Image: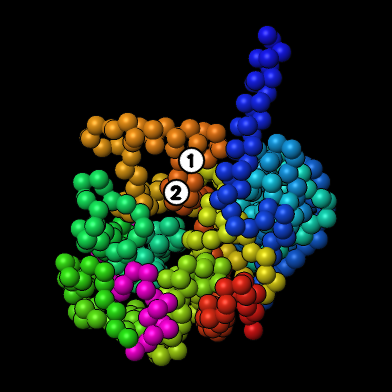
Amino acid sequence: MVAAVLAGLLTLAAGIVWLRVRRYRGIFRIAARRDDSCVCRGPSRVFAVSAAPDGIELPNEAFGSGRSAFLAIDVSVTMTGRVFDPYIEVGRHPELYRQYFEREATGIRYVNLSPAVQAAAGNSGSTRITLRGGHLRWKPSASVMVFEPPALTGGDALVVAPHPDDSEIGAFGFYSERPSWILTVSSGEVSPTGLSPVVPPGPEQTQWRALLRVHDSLTNPGLGGVDRERCLNLVYPDGRLKQMHDEPTRTFALACESTLSRRTLRHKNPPGRLRDGSPDCRWSDLVEDLRWTLDRVRPRTLVCTHPLVDPHPDHVYTSVAVADALRAGAHAPELILLYVIHVNEAPVYPFGGADSLVSLPPWQHREWIADSIHSLPLSQDARIAKYFAVEAAHDLRSYYSDSRVRTFRQLVGIARRELGAFVTGMAPRPADFLRRAPRPNELYYVVSVEAFLELTRVAVEAHRAPQSSRSVARAG
């Protein structure tokens, strides 16, 4: 009898482990056994180091205020790292930060050493950085890339967001620290996420989604101290930017135009040119709106999505439109920062809980993707404000509870979702931005205007290539 019970328990445990591994693997479209890459063509310093099981030694010249540093290290998970989330704790005791990797991670990965390098600046004591692994081990041969901080002081910044909420997810910490403008390109009316159950499915959802998301884009940056007069939305059709680029003579309209017009939504902008708007719009209209804004705001720093690392079509072609506007306009920013929100191959990136560090996203290609990298630390107050700014986006909220009585079918669905989350060790919504966004740091790829124009050219070529060859488009 005892043997039968033990056999049953072992079978149940094996089944749970199998389900946990299988469900987790199903999220990814990239192999866990791979070597990630990060090629920057701007100035940096690279130090060869020996990664002992408990840490590394760096020379004094690697440390400096505001610097960003990344350890390229060959990792492999232990047996438990196939079932639990592997991690490395990094820092200088007692200040340790945790960075997670995907389960079964094997090969070259990048560990963000920036908090330790920045905190030790000017410290004449130990130059040893602690490494503590959980469900993970690594080979001793490693290297550290160190980047100087970009010159971010002085002048206004312009943050360009493809959709409402993108600026908060990707750049809230940045824009809350300096005089900034927030420019959103689309109304976000066809977001796949649902609204409150009080809005029935169908055309009403599209109308309400546009109204609420445009409102969010104009008001939520206020939680980061941005004046209402510095928040703009161009109200272009959601999900259509690539098509607008590829068919430049064709006119496009919002999905909700018949019930809520583009002109009405644009009229919510502060008084000025961007309050007007035809119901029909072309690619040239988008480029001209961006050119006008750039020449009016004259930002010293421009922030937008990375056209290669973030493959969402609207994100790619927002950057392409910005590049076209820069070519047509009179003003060029001194610096461009690129952020990443979507990583299709790993939709749960950044890995781990909201308290863990953001490091470089999965990227296997050997072509350059930036001049340098900047890891921007966020204070505790900034992280709290960012959480509430992201949570304020109507399309990112979870409407699991409402006043209606549950049907048996709904109850079964909730039970399956919660039980599945418990078994797999993930949240019910693994890609939830309330986990992914309010981290201790934000990560930016730093480029010049010329480098940005080159990256957008490569991105367009990649999207024109057959699907099977897109991932190998080469940068200049």
Q: Residue 361's mark?
A: none
**320 left or right of 65?**
left
* Between 127 and 141, the one nearer to me in the picture: 141
Q: Name which residue lies at 45% across and 41% down.
A: 428
Query: Which residue of the protein is positioned furthest toward the top in this rendering?
Result: 1
Neighbourhood count class around disc 1 (C-alpha, 10 Å): few under 14, some 14–19, many 20 upward: some
Residue range of the region highlighted in magenta in the rendering = 224-249
- Kindly identify which residue carries mark 1: 427
Whichever of labels 2 and 1 marks the residue nearer the N terminus, that label is: 1
Q: Residues within 10 Å of mark 2 (few under 14, many from 20)?
A: some
How far across and down, in percent of the image, does residue 198 sit? 21, 46
Apparent side of residue 47 relative to residue 165 in the rendered image (left or right): right
Q: Which structural element holds mark 2?
A: loop
Say if the magenta span includes residue 421.
no
Q: Is residue 183 visible?
A: no
Position of residue 400 measured from the top left corner of the image (x, y, whole percent): 33, 39
Residue 432: numbered disc: 2
The quadrant the C terminus occupies is bottom right
Amino acid, disc 2: Asp
> Are the residues at dot 2 and dot 1 in contact (C-beta closer than 8 Å)?
yes
Name the foreground residue: 313 vs 175. 313
Q: Residue at x 28, y 51 (%)?
A: 195
The answer to whether residue 323 is seen in the rendering is: yes
- Dividing the picture into quadrants, the one containing residue 34 is bottom right
* Type of amino acid at the residue the image marks with label 1: Ala
- Give how far across and how far down residue 321 sits, in percent: 42, 80
Colour convention of the picture:
rainbow
